[in-house]
Image: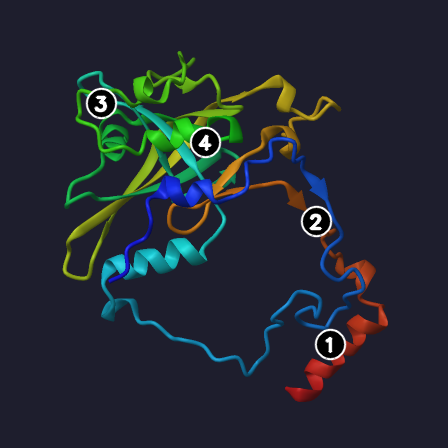
Amino acid sequence: MSRRPPFKQVEASRPDFRPEAEFEYTKVPDPSWAPGQGANSVVPNRPTATDAFTTIDPATRDAGDVYKLMISAITPRPIAFVSSISDKGVANLAPFSYFSTCGHNPPMIAVSFSTKAGDLKDTASNILHQKEFVVNIISEQILEAANYTCIDAPANVSEWDLSGLTPVPSETIKPARVAESPFAMECTLEHSYEMKTDDGTPTGLHVLGRVRRFHVRSSVLAEDGSTIADIAKLRPVSRLGGITYGRTIEGSELPRPVWEKEKERAEVKGAVEGAAGTA
Protein backbone atom coordinates (compact mmCIF):
# COMPACT_ATOMS: atom_id res chain seq x y z
CA MET A 1 0.00 0.00 0.00
CA SER A 2 1.36 3.41 -0.95
CA ARG A 3 1.99 5.88 1.84
CA ARG A 4 1.24 9.56 1.57
CA PRO A 5 4.10 11.99 2.22
CA PRO A 6 4.06 13.86 5.56
CA PHE A 7 1.32 16.49 5.57
CA LYS A 8 3.67 19.44 6.09
CA GLN A 9 5.66 18.31 3.06
CA VAL A 10 2.50 18.26 0.96
CA GLU A 11 1.32 21.61 2.33
CA ALA A 12 4.68 23.25 1.54
CA SER A 13 4.17 22.48 -2.15
CA ARG A 14 0.87 24.37 -2.28
CA PRO A 15 0.19 28.09 -2.89
CA ASP A 16 -0.01 30.39 0.12
CA PHE A 17 -3.39 31.22 1.60
CA ARG A 18 -4.83 34.33 -0.04
CA PRO A 19 -6.12 36.54 2.80
CA GLU A 20 -6.84 39.33 0.33
CA ALA A 21 -9.44 37.22 -1.50
CA GLU A 22 -12.82 38.89 -1.06
CA PHE A 23 -16.26 37.42 -1.55
CA GLU A 24 -17.64 38.33 -4.96
CA TYR A 25 -20.76 37.66 -6.96
CA THR A 26 -20.56 36.14 -10.44
CA LYS A 27 -23.23 35.34 -12.96
CA VAL A 28 -24.79 31.88 -12.80
CA PRO A 29 -23.18 29.36 -15.17
CA ASP A 30 -25.78 30.01 -17.88
CA PRO A 31 -27.74 33.28 -17.55
CA SER A 32 -29.69 32.36 -20.70
CA TRP A 33 -31.02 29.11 -19.19
CA ALA A 34 -34.72 28.55 -19.97
CA PRO A 35 -37.42 26.40 -18.32
CA GLY A 36 -37.36 22.84 -19.62
CA GLN A 37 -33.69 23.03 -20.61
CA GLY A 38 -32.34 20.73 -17.91
CA ALA A 39 -28.65 20.83 -17.03
CA ASN A 40 -26.70 23.75 -18.45
CA SER A 41 -24.01 23.14 -21.06
CA VAL A 42 -21.48 25.59 -19.65
CA VAL A 43 -19.98 23.61 -16.78
CA PRO A 44 -17.60 20.84 -17.98
CA ASN A 45 -18.71 17.19 -17.87
CA ARG A 46 -22.37 17.95 -18.52
CA PRO A 47 -24.47 15.10 -17.06
CA THR A 48 -26.59 13.00 -19.38
CA ALA A 49 -29.28 10.36 -18.94
CA THR A 50 -26.83 7.69 -20.16
CA ASP A 51 -24.06 8.39 -17.65
CA ALA A 52 -22.80 5.29 -15.84
CA PHE A 53 -23.58 5.10 -12.12
CA THR A 54 -22.21 2.95 -9.33
CA THR A 55 -24.98 1.82 -7.01
CA ILE A 56 -23.91 1.14 -3.43
CA ASP A 57 -25.92 -0.74 -0.81
CA PRO A 58 -24.66 0.59 2.54
CA ALA A 59 -25.73 -2.63 4.26
CA THR A 60 -23.04 -4.49 2.30
CA ARG A 61 -20.23 -2.03 2.96
CA ASP A 62 -18.00 -1.32 5.91
CA ALA A 63 -19.24 1.63 7.97
CA GLY A 64 -15.91 3.38 7.39
CA ASP A 65 -16.40 3.24 3.63
CA VAL A 66 -19.92 4.64 3.95
CA TYR A 67 -18.56 7.43 6.12
CA LYS A 68 -15.89 8.36 3.55
CA LEU A 69 -18.47 8.37 0.76
CA MET A 70 -20.95 10.55 2.62
CA ILE A 71 -18.52 13.19 3.88
CA SER A 72 -16.87 13.49 0.47
CA ALA A 73 -20.14 13.76 -1.47
CA ILE A 74 -22.38 15.71 0.90
CA THR A 75 -20.44 18.95 0.66
CA PRO A 76 -19.91 21.66 1.63
CA ARG A 77 -21.13 21.20 5.21
CA PRO A 78 -21.33 24.00 7.78
CA ILE A 79 -19.44 23.31 10.99
CA ALA A 80 -20.83 23.52 14.50
CA PHE A 81 -18.03 24.53 16.86
CA VAL A 82 -19.64 23.29 20.05
CA SER A 83 -18.91 24.44 23.58
CA SER A 84 -20.29 22.30 26.41
CA ILE A 85 -19.68 21.47 30.08
CA SER A 86 -19.59 18.06 31.76
CA ASP A 87 -21.44 17.14 34.93
CA LYS A 88 -18.09 17.64 36.72
CA GLY A 89 -17.75 21.17 35.39
CA VAL A 90 -15.10 20.37 32.76
CA ALA A 91 -15.40 22.66 29.72
CA ASN A 92 -15.25 21.04 26.29
CA LEU A 93 -14.81 22.57 22.83
CA ALA A 94 -14.97 20.63 19.55
CA PRO A 95 -16.11 20.96 15.88
CA PHE A 96 -18.78 18.80 14.21
CA SER A 97 -19.94 18.97 10.60
CA TYR A 98 -23.13 16.91 10.90
CA PHE A 99 -24.87 20.22 11.47
CA SER A 100 -27.57 22.47 10.05
CA THR A 101 -30.33 24.92 10.87
CA CYS A 102 -33.73 23.23 10.86
CA GLY A 103 -36.24 25.94 11.82
CA HIS A 104 -36.56 29.63 12.68
CA ASN A 105 -39.81 29.91 14.69
CA PRO A 106 -38.73 28.87 17.22
CA PRO A 107 -35.08 29.01 16.10
CA MET A 108 -33.74 25.45 16.02
CA ILE A 109 -30.47 23.83 14.98
CA ALA A 110 -29.53 20.17 14.55
CA VAL A 111 -26.21 18.49 15.34
CA SER A 112 -25.31 14.81 15.15
CA PHE A 113 -22.48 13.00 16.91
CA SER A 114 -21.00 9.60 16.06
CA THR A 115 -19.96 7.26 18.84
CA LYS A 116 -16.30 6.59 19.57
CA ALA A 117 -15.51 2.94 20.30
CA GLY A 118 -19.17 2.49 21.17
CA ASP A 119 -19.26 5.40 23.61
CA LEU A 120 -20.73 8.87 23.20
CA LYS A 121 -18.22 11.60 22.53
CA ASP A 122 -17.72 14.05 25.40
CA THR A 123 -19.71 16.80 23.68
CA ALA A 124 -22.71 14.55 23.04
CA SER A 125 -22.65 13.21 26.58
CA ASN A 126 -22.42 16.72 28.01
CA ILE A 127 -25.40 17.92 25.96
CA LEU A 128 -27.46 14.88 26.89
CA HIS A 129 -26.83 15.33 30.61
CA GLN A 130 -26.57 19.11 30.98
CA LYS A 131 -29.11 19.92 28.23
CA GLU A 132 -27.32 23.07 27.06
CA PHE A 133 -24.53 24.03 24.67
CA VAL A 134 -23.20 26.81 22.45
CA VAL A 135 -22.72 26.52 18.70
CA ASN A 136 -20.07 28.87 17.32
CA ILE A 137 -19.47 29.41 13.61
CA ILE A 138 -15.92 28.86 12.41
CA SER A 139 -14.53 31.75 10.39
CA GLU A 140 -11.26 31.81 8.47
CA GLN A 141 -9.58 33.61 11.37
CA ILE A 142 -10.04 30.67 13.75
CA LEU A 143 -9.71 27.72 11.36
CA GLU A 144 -6.41 26.39 12.73
CA ALA A 145 -7.44 26.88 16.35
CA ALA A 146 -10.80 25.18 15.82
CA ASN A 147 -9.23 22.24 14.00
CA TYR A 148 -6.75 21.70 16.83
CA THR A 149 -9.62 21.04 19.24
CA CYS A 150 -10.20 17.76 17.35
CA ILE A 151 -7.17 16.38 19.18
CA ASP A 152 -7.62 13.19 21.22
CA ALA A 153 -6.32 14.83 24.40
CA PRO A 154 -6.84 13.29 27.86
CA ALA A 155 -9.99 14.32 29.69
CA ASN A 156 -8.03 16.58 32.06
CA VAL A 157 -6.59 18.66 29.17
CA SER A 158 -8.67 21.64 28.04
CA GLU A 159 -9.29 22.17 24.33
CA TRP A 160 -9.80 25.84 25.18
CA ASP A 161 -6.21 26.06 26.40
CA LEU A 162 -4.83 24.17 23.42
CA SER A 163 -6.68 26.35 20.93
CA GLY A 164 -5.79 29.65 22.58
CA LEU A 165 -9.34 30.87 21.99
CA THR A 166 -11.14 33.06 24.49
CA PRO A 167 -14.21 31.90 26.44
CA VAL A 168 -16.92 34.51 27.04
CA PRO A 169 -19.71 33.84 29.58
CA SER A 170 -23.11 33.13 28.05
CA GLU A 171 -26.25 34.95 29.16
CA THR A 172 -28.67 32.05 29.63
CA ILE A 173 -26.58 28.88 29.97
CA LYS A 174 -23.34 27.70 31.58
CA PRO A 175 -21.14 26.83 28.56
CA ALA A 176 -19.12 29.78 27.26
CA ARG A 177 -19.09 31.03 23.69
CA VAL A 178 -15.94 31.66 21.64
CA ALA A 179 -15.09 35.37 21.62
CA GLU A 180 -13.25 35.14 18.31
CA SER A 181 -16.22 33.55 16.52
CA PRO A 182 -18.33 36.13 14.62
CA PHE A 183 -21.58 34.26 15.29
CA ALA A 184 -22.62 32.12 18.23
CA MET A 185 -25.86 30.58 19.49
CA GLU A 186 -26.74 29.70 23.07
CA CYS A 187 -28.85 26.55 22.88
CA THR A 188 -30.89 24.31 25.15
CA LEU A 189 -31.63 20.68 24.31
CA GLU A 190 -35.06 20.36 22.71
CA HIS A 191 -34.92 16.74 21.63
CA SER A 192 -32.45 13.88 21.24
CA TYR A 193 -32.57 10.69 19.21
CA GLU A 194 -30.23 7.73 19.55
CA MET A 195 -29.18 6.26 16.20
CA LYS A 196 -28.73 2.48 16.02
CA THR A 197 -27.79 -0.21 13.52
CA ASP A 198 -30.31 -2.87 12.49
CA ASP A 199 -29.08 -5.10 15.31
CA GLY A 200 -29.65 -2.37 17.89
CA THR A 201 -26.07 -1.21 18.34
CA PRO A 202 -25.93 2.52 19.24
CA THR A 203 -23.84 4.45 16.71
CA GLY A 204 -24.65 8.09 17.32
CA LEU A 205 -26.79 10.80 18.81
CA HIS A 206 -28.86 13.40 16.96
CA VAL A 207 -29.87 16.48 18.91
CA LEU A 208 -32.15 19.42 18.25
CA GLY A 209 -31.19 22.60 20.04
CA ARG A 210 -33.43 25.59 20.62
CA VAL A 211 -31.56 28.87 20.27
CA ARG A 212 -32.02 31.09 23.31
CA ARG A 213 -29.56 33.81 22.34
CA PHE A 214 -27.76 34.88 19.18
CA HIS A 215 -24.45 36.72 19.45
CA VAL A 216 -23.41 38.42 16.20
CA ARG A 217 -20.33 40.59 15.84
CA SER A 218 -21.77 43.98 14.96
CA SER A 219 -19.37 44.50 12.08
CA VAL A 220 -20.71 41.32 10.44
CA LEU A 221 -24.29 42.57 10.24
CA ALA A 222 -25.47 44.27 7.05
CA GLU A 223 -24.98 48.02 7.01
CA ASP A 224 -28.69 48.67 6.43
CA GLY A 225 -29.43 47.77 10.05
CA SER A 226 -31.14 44.45 9.24
CA THR A 227 -30.43 41.11 10.93
CA ILE A 228 -28.73 39.77 7.80
CA ALA A 229 -25.15 38.58 8.26
CA ASP A 230 -22.83 39.77 5.49
CA ILE A 231 -21.16 36.67 4.04
CA ALA A 232 -18.16 38.74 2.96
CA LYS A 233 -17.53 39.69 6.59
CA LEU A 234 -18.60 36.42 8.21
CA ARG A 235 -16.04 34.49 6.12
CA PRO A 236 -17.34 31.07 7.20
CA VAL A 237 -15.38 27.87 6.70
CA SER A 238 -17.04 24.63 5.60
CA ARG A 239 -16.11 20.97 5.72
CA LEU A 240 -15.38 18.93 2.61
CA GLY A 241 -14.15 15.34 2.34
CA GLY A 242 -11.20 13.91 4.25
CA ILE A 243 -9.28 16.62 6.09
CA THR A 244 -10.26 19.33 3.62
CA TYR A 245 -11.91 22.62 4.52
CA GLY A 246 -13.57 25.03 2.11
CA ARG A 247 -13.77 28.82 1.86
CA THR A 248 -16.84 30.78 0.82
CA ILE A 249 -15.51 33.48 -1.48
CA GLU A 250 -17.80 33.33 -4.51
CA GLY A 251 -21.54 33.15 -5.07
CA SER A 252 -24.30 33.57 -7.64
CA GLU A 253 -27.83 34.87 -7.13
CA LEU A 254 -31.04 33.48 -8.60
CA PRO A 255 -34.54 34.84 -7.86
CA ARG A 256 -37.18 32.31 -6.84
CA PRO A 257 -39.62 31.90 -9.77
CA VAL A 258 -43.25 32.91 -9.19
CA TRP A 259 -45.82 30.90 -11.14
CA GLU A 260 -48.21 33.81 -11.78
CA LYS A 261 -45.38 35.71 -13.43
CA GLU A 262 -43.87 32.75 -15.28
CA LYS A 263 -46.82 30.72 -16.56
CA GLU A 264 -47.34 32.75 -19.74
CA ARG A 265 -43.73 32.46 -20.90
CA ALA A 266 -43.39 30.46 -24.09
CA GLU A 267 -40.66 28.29 -22.56
CA VAL A 268 -42.85 27.43 -19.58
CA LYS A 269 -45.83 26.55 -21.77
CA GLY A 270 -43.59 24.47 -23.99
CA ALA A 271 -42.12 22.56 -21.04
CA VAL A 272 -45.58 21.87 -19.56
CA GLU A 273 -47.16 20.89 -22.87
CA GLY A 274 -44.19 18.72 -23.75
CA ALA A 275 -44.43 16.86 -20.45
CA ALA A 276 -48.19 16.38 -20.91
CA GLY A 277 -47.64 14.99 -24.40
CA THR A 278 -45.30 12.27 -23.12
CA ALA A 279 -47.47 11.30 -20.12
Closer to us: 15 or 79: 15
Residue located beneath label 4 in the image: 143
State the mark number for residue 86: 3
* Mark 4: amino acid: Leu
Residue beneath disc 2: 252
Q: Is residue 221 left or right of residue 89?
A: right
Residue displayed at 77% across by 68% down: 34
Viewer-side residue, 97 vs 174: 97
Q: Which mark is residue 195?
A: none
**In this figure, which residue is indicated by the disc labeled 1?**
272
Q: Secondary structure at mark 2?
A: loop
Confirm whether residue 184 shows in the render. Answer: yes
Q: Earlier in the sequence, mark 2 or mark 3?
A: 3
Q: Quadrant of residue 97?
A: top left
76 sits to left or right of 4: right
Residue type pointed to by label 1: Val
Q: Are marks 1 and 2 in contact (CB under 8 Å)?
A: no
Please tell me whether mark 4 or mark 2 is closer to you in this view. Answer: 4
Secondary structure found at label 1: helix
Q: Residues within 10 Å of mark 1 (few under 14, many from 20)?
A: some
Q: Residues within 10 Å of mark 4 (few under 14, many from 20)?
A: some
Q: Could you tell me how far apart the alpha carbons at marks 4 and 2 are, in whole angstroms? A: 25 Å
What residue is at 59 percent from the left and 73 percent from the top?
47
Q: Residues within 10 Å of mark 2 (few under 14, many from 20)?
A: few
Q: Is the residue 271 above or below the residue 24 in the image?
A: below
